[in-house]
Amino acid sequence: MTDKTALAAEIADAKTAMENRIKKSVREYARLYRVTARVEDPLIRDILKLHFVDGLTWRGTAEKLGGGNTADGIRMAVKRWMRNKKQQGRPD
């Protein structure tokens, strides 16, 4: 195998791996979006989408929400919401 052929094969393998990772990311994004869409509380739903789906920090999420929300305040709201759901035995 020549150097050019080996390089072409390596590039093709890398391209395939990258395409597979992109497809997996798209599926995971869609799954996260579906899960958050089922949340009944609109504020918690917005927080979850901004933080977990869009990838904002807690601070960035609080700033995006506005209304005097703080990073610690929304983080704790989500923590309480998750604890309540766990106690109820409900996933959403």
Image (spheres, helix red, strand yellow):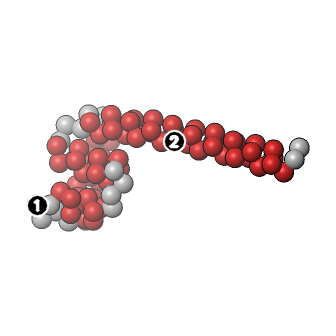
Residue at 17% x, 42% y is: 41
**Residue 43 horizontal/vertical position (percent):** 17, 48
Instruction: Evaluate whether residue 38 shows in this view.
Output: yes
Q: What separation in Å lies between label 2 and label 1 (alpha carbons)?
A: 35 Å
Residue at the extreme right of the image, as rendered = 1
Query: Which amino acid type corresponds to the residue marked 2 in the rendered image?
Result: Ile
Q: Which quadrant does the N terminus fall into?
A: top right
Q: Position of residue 13 (x, y in %)?
A: 70, 42
Badge 1: how crowded within 10 Å, few (<14), some, or many (20+)? few
Residue denoted by label 1: 67
The answer to which of 71 and 15 lies nearer the viewer is 15
**Residue 40 spot, x, y in % from top left:** 19, 37
Mark 2 lies on residue:
22
Q: Earlier in the sequence, mark 2 or mark 1?
A: 2
Q: How many marks?
A: 2
Q: Residue at x 66, y 46 (%)?
A: 14
Q: Measured along the vertical axis of the image, is residue 7 above or below residue 70?
A: above
Measuring 76% from the left and 42% from the top, which residue is drawn there? 9
Q: What crowding class fits label 2: few (fewer than 14 Cα within 10 Å), some (14-19), or many (20 or more)?
A: few
Which residue shows up at 45% across the image and 35% down it? 27
The residue lying furthest to the left in this view is 67
Q: Considering only vertical position in the picture, is 27 above or below 3? A: above
Is residue 76 in view? no
> Which numbered marker is on residue 51?
none
Q: Secondary structure at mark 1?
A: loop
How far from the left and from the top, in percent, is residue 49?
29, 47
Amino acid at the residue labelled 1: Gly
Instruction: Please tell me whether mark 2 or mark 1 is closer to you in this view.
Output: 2
Q: Are marks 2 and 1 in contact (CB under 8 Å)?
A: no
Quadrant location of residue 67? Answer: bottom left
**The one of 49 and 17 positioned closer to us in this rendering:** 17
- Disc 2 element: helix
